[in-house]
Amino acid sequence: MKIEILGPGCSKCEKLLKNVEKAVEEQRIEKCEIEKITDLKKILAYGIMMTPGLVVDGKIKSVGKVLSPDDIKKLLAR
């Protein structure tokens, strides 16, 4: 599983990253790569206009929200 956090490095992006890390740890997902994308061109390539963005295995799951660890766990379980 590959999870990408899209954002320029603002406090919301950092909080989403921490929440993703917590959700992955609590779910005991072993094979998971978490990557923070700050390059504006890469972010825009996904077609999102608001950050933070959450992408799981190439699919946009959330835009412009700081999801809680519980919300993230629900997305990862699908």
Image (cartoon, grey):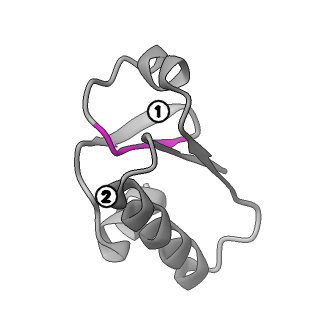
Q: Is residue 48 above or below residue 22?
A: above
Q: Look at mark 1 in the image and give the residue it sits on.
A: 59
Q: Please provide percent x and percent y for residue 77.
A: 46, 62
SS label for mark 2: helix
Tell which circle, 2 or 1, labels the residue nearer the N-terminal end: 2
Give the residues drawn in magenta, as a range. 51-56
Q: Residue at x 40, y 34 (%)?
A: 60
Residue placed at 70% from the left, 59% from the top? Answer: 32
Left or right, 1 with reference to 59: right
Q: Residues within 10 Å of mark 1 (few under 14, many from 20)?
A: few
Residue position for label 2 = 12
Q: Position of residue 37 (x, y in %)?
A: 56, 39
On the image, which quarter does residue 29 sit in? Answer: bottom right
Quadrant of the image containing the C terminus: bottom left
Residue 66 image point, x, y percent: 27, 59
x 74%, y 71%: residue: 30
